[in-house]
Image (cartoon, rainbow, N blue to C red):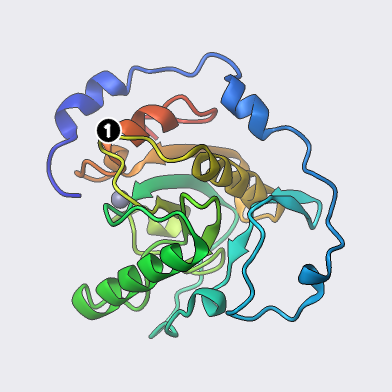
Amino acid sequence: MTGGGRGDRRTLSRTTWVGASPAWAEFRAPASPAISSPALAWPPSSLAWLPVRPFAARGGCCPTIVSRRQWGARPPRSRVPLRTPVPYVIIHHTTGNRCTSQASCSREVKGIQNYHMNTQRWSDIGYNFLIGEDGRVYEGRGWKTMGAHAKKWNHKSLGFSFLGNFSNRIPSAAALNAAKSLIQCAISRGFLKRSYTVTGHRNVNPTSCPGNALYRVISKWPRFKAKP
Ligand SMILES: [Zn+2]
């Protein structure tokens, strides 16, 4: 995630979003009706597999979020509150392994937390949320805690990181839809300003993150800015 990226950043930054793409329109489709399946009535436990399908929650359209307890997080060493609503969403990729199930993505997230806490000596996993190609979102520091994902920007942004390496391929449609849904969820729950800007990690720090392929995708999203 270091070096590179700066050269082609200028060219890529010229990309301007000009209208609703089919992918975005698809995402904005109304959520399916709330499911009254017995599965949802179970007390949440790390053993309960969560449905991938987004469902209406608290008036907004939120993706399935796997809680820290559900993926087996270690407790943070400390927490700094994030002042919300923040004006920015910063997109990352983890450069780790691809994962397409709750079990494999949970293992990935645990590995990243261990790396951030043991090797980087951070207080917790750096990102606010992580997005799996299983279409689920994994809670990192969450909505209310300042992340450690983009130097000088942590206090005014939410850091969303796609699990995997997206230099040469784009994330699954399920992952991209989950990310878009997470942005709407953040607004509806009051953690992100309606007038938010979405940008890539490479646009605020010298890094190739979130990978060229993923960067090309997010640069077409509404409210993307290459120079935030
Ligand atoms: Zn990054």
Residue 174 vertical position relative to residue 62 in the rendered view, above or below: above
Q: Position of residue 109 (x, y in %)?
A: 39, 67
Q: Residue furthest top?
A: 18
**Left or right: where 169 falls relative to 178:** left
Mark 1 C-beta to ligand 1 under 8 Å: no
| Horizontal relation, residue 21 to residue 37: left or right | left
| Residue 74 location (% of width, % of height) | 42, 84
Q: Is residue 33 visible?
A: yes
The total number of labels drawn is 1
- The residue lying at 27 percent from left, 33 percent from top is 212
Q: Quadrant of residue 37?
A: bottom right
Query: For the residue carrying disc 1, how many other residues have a C-alpha within 10 Å: few (<14), some (14-19), or many (20+)?
Result: many
Q: Which sits in the foreground, 169 or 92?
A: 169
Nearest the camera: 28 or 33? 33
The quadrant of the picture occupied by the C terminus is top left
Q: Secondary structure at mark 1?
A: helix
Q: 31 or 189, which lies in front?
A: 31
195 displayed left or right of 133: right
Type of amino acid under label 1: Asn
Residue 146 appears in view: no
Q: Position of residue 106 (x, y in %)?
A: 45, 68
Q: From the viewer's perspective, is residue 14 above or below residue 135?
A: above
**Residue at horizontal 59 percent and vertical 79 percent from the top:** 47
Quarter holding residue 123: bottom left
Give percent across and percent down for residue 124: 37, 76
Specify the farthest residue to the left: 3
* Residue 200 falls in image quadrant: top left
Looking at the image, which residue is at 58% across and 59% down? Answer: 84
Q: Which residue is mark 1?
A: 212
Answer above or below: position of 64 versus 93: below
